[in-house]
Image (cartoon, rainbow, N blue to C red):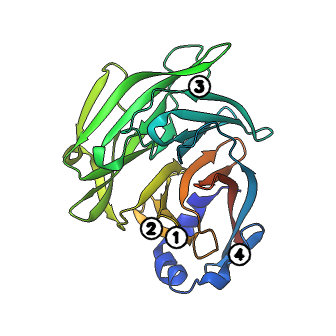
Amino acid sequence: MFILRQISVCVSAIFVAAFLCSCSKEDFVDLDTDFKVQLNDSICMNIQMNYLFQVPTITSNGIQGASISNNYLFICHDFLNVIDVIDLNDNSLFTYIEYRENQALHANTVNFSSYYYEKGDMFPLLYVQERGSNCVTHVYRIITGKDRWSLEEVQKISFYNASSLTTALDNEASYLYCFYSTNSSAFLGKTEIPSMEKAEVEIDINDLDDPFQIQYNYTGQDACIADGIFFKLYGGAGQGELRLVDLVSKELFLTIDLAGLGYKSEPESIAYDYNRQRFILIFVDRSVYELYFELVKE
């Protein structure tokens, strides 16, 4: 069902004018069932959002970013004191990873890479963002011991000359995208994913490739990239949005008003499930949903 690249190519030239101006809350009937958005006379988009489960956890720290690998959903919590590991085959808590609590590690965005630190590792490297204002991303190896899983930090990436910055990985193109703000303006730029040769890497945002300006919103949440589309959550309680940006045309081509649809809880996590071609969306109240997109030619 995931064919957003086709959606963007077909309608990006007219989408902002035709969709954002004409779409109201009434277009979104019930996110627990299928609903349809008419893009033009011959193309519409079906969107489906289904409730899955409540996150079981051992910590009271708030849910933050999440990512998926090998049918496991990794849900990080504030200060990175705990990562819940959910088996997506039955949506159960498989295990959890306890880590030293660090108030800087807000885990605002969390992404798996496609790079395995050592041959035989069960999971690729995990990129975890500090608070946006710190402009730092940590890279972890997940060690899957027989009795307990753990994290090993293998790299720290620090960014300079931005007032706020979060990162997202485009594993298909091997780029690390940076969503950053300067003087109340927001931009997306990219750099090659740093090699593991250095334990500490410094990047000046002025050296990023192909930066472009996008709509600014201070309250940024988790982000992920799939099929050349940048998916970014925004907003606090009663203000949640999901925005989709085409990384080729550099256009914002879809905004989903989650709060307007009745989801008043603060959105925290978005992750793409490659095996099932769906997105996982998690709110601060620990509710977990699956989200599907489908283009239909009438």
Disc 4 from disc 3: Cα separation: 37 Å
Q: Badge 2, how many Cα within 10 Å: few under 14, some, many 20+?
A: some
The answer to whether residue 151 is above or below residue 92 is above
- Residue found at x 68% / y 45%: 55
* Residue 122, x across and y down, in percent: 62, 21
Image check: 40 left or right of 92? left
* Residue 145, x across and y down, in percent: 63, 14
Residue located beneath label 4 in the image: 36
Choose the circle earlier in sequence order: 4 or 2: 4
Residue located beneath label 3 in the image: 123
Which image quarter is the C terminus in?
A: bottom right
Q: In what element is the residue under mark 1?
A: strand
Instruction: Say which mark, if any, is on residue 255.
Output: 1
Choose the circle earlier in sequence order: 3 or 2: 3
The amino acid marked with disc number 1 is Thr
Residue located beneath label 2 in the image: 252
Q: Badge 3, how many Cα within 10 Å: few under 14, some, many 20+?
A: many
**Observer-nearest of 144 and 48:** 144
